[in-house]
Image (spheres, rainbow, N blue to C red):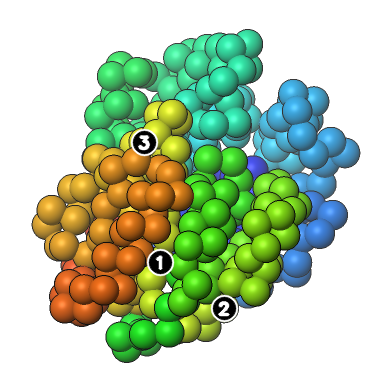
Amino acid sequence: MKIICLVINDLSHDQRMDRICTSLQAAGHDVTLVGRLLPGSPPLSDRPYRQHRITCRHHGGKRFYGEYNWKLWRTLRSWEYDVICAVDLDTLVAGTLLHRRGTKLVYDAHEWFSETPEVAPRPLIRGTWRGIGKALVPRTDARYTVGTELAVALEQDYGVPFGTVRNVPRLTDTAIKENTGGVILYQGMLNPGRGLEEAITAMTALPDHHLLIVGSGPEEERLHLLTRELDVTDRVTFAGFHRPDKLAEFTQRAWLGLNLLRADSLSYYYSLANKSLDYVQAGLPSIQMDYPEYRSINDRYGCYALLSELNADALIAQVKHLAENRDAYRQMHQNCLLAAEELCWEREEQKLLSIYADL
């Protein structure tokens, strides 16, 4: 089948879509991933599937969403395809318009879009996205999301079934040895609600540790300012954005990983973040929030330290506990290595391929 996947990012750092498109292409499909060209977008790397970027005049707000979906429709309407895969609600309008007779429309929900921290506190904006979802999601031919708990929540919200394709990485042969250097790693977008303020604040009470932040985003300037205000610039490093294939270089230096999220966002509460499974694949013990998906994985594999509440004091206590209980830390490290053999894309991709085989 000819499959076109629609995303709103610039394609350069979307590990999930790279895995999905690579697997579909390897299974014999003809795949094109369509995204956006931003002013600072790096050149595209060679991939086994085709890539196409669209340029927009606007880069935020309702004008941007309208322009981008219109340009998706205008650009792709003359293309030949069998399947349109719309990733999240922000491309589903275009996907629905492109869903013509004889084609299939698939919805890939990376998150609970209307319940994200950027959308949920704004009643008018949230209502608009909820209306779009209620109107369009039930019209799709197949749907899947990143975790089983989120799949249940989305089924209840939209009244149609969702499959699960988790954000697990590929098997790696470069898992870290047990590090003792005290480097605490955060990798990902610097967005609101990611626990970065709490992590930086915690460094005031962790003089033997160093926080390494790898990523970029809208909170970056404010986090730099907080680091200076708390006088912990010697214990916090901002490494900036790096392509996914370079992240292992930072992971090799780490003693502990972080994935901290506010519970006031239902999308975060039901999340299964890429980084949480990247840490496992690297053999890196990590601190995760005590939310359903992370708790379920930890109950089975014992590879996380779970944080019941997001604040600096709770984080400090958890880091100190792991630093002082070396046997517990070593066991988590070994548990990660064992879990990595099961929590890998080589197993998970079969779920993806079966969804498309059933269209």
User: Quick one: label 2 or label 1, which is nearer the N terminus?
Assistant: 2
The answer to whether the residues at label 3 and label 2 have Cβ atoms under 8 Å apart is no
Other residues around mark 3 within 10 Å, as few (<14) / some (14–19) / many (≥20): many
Q: How far apart are the alpha carbons under marks 2 and 1?
A: 16 Å
The image quarter in which residue 65 lies: top right
The answer to whether the residues at label 2 and label 1 have Cβ atoms under 8 Å apart is no
Q: Nearer the viewer, residue 115 or 245?
A: 115
- Provide the residue designation for mark 3: 269
Q: Residue at x 50, y 72 (%)?
A: 207
Between marks 2 and 1 in the image, the one whose residue lies nearer the viewer: 1
Q: Is residue 123 left or right of residue 43?
A: left
The image quarter in which residue 51 lies: bottom right
Other residues around mark 1 within 10 Å, as few (<14) / some (14–19) / many (≥20): many
- Provide the residue designation for mark 2: 246
The label shown at residue 257 is 1
The image quarter in which residue 93 lies: top right
Q: Residue at x 46, y 67 (%)?
A: 206
Which quadrant is the C terminus positioned in?
Answer: top left
Q: How far apart are the alpha carbons under marks 3 and 1?
A: 19 Å
Q: Is residue 122 left or right of residue 229?
A: left
Between marks 3 and 2 in the image, the one whose residue lies nearer the viewer: 3
Q: Is residue 300 left or right of residue 183?
A: left
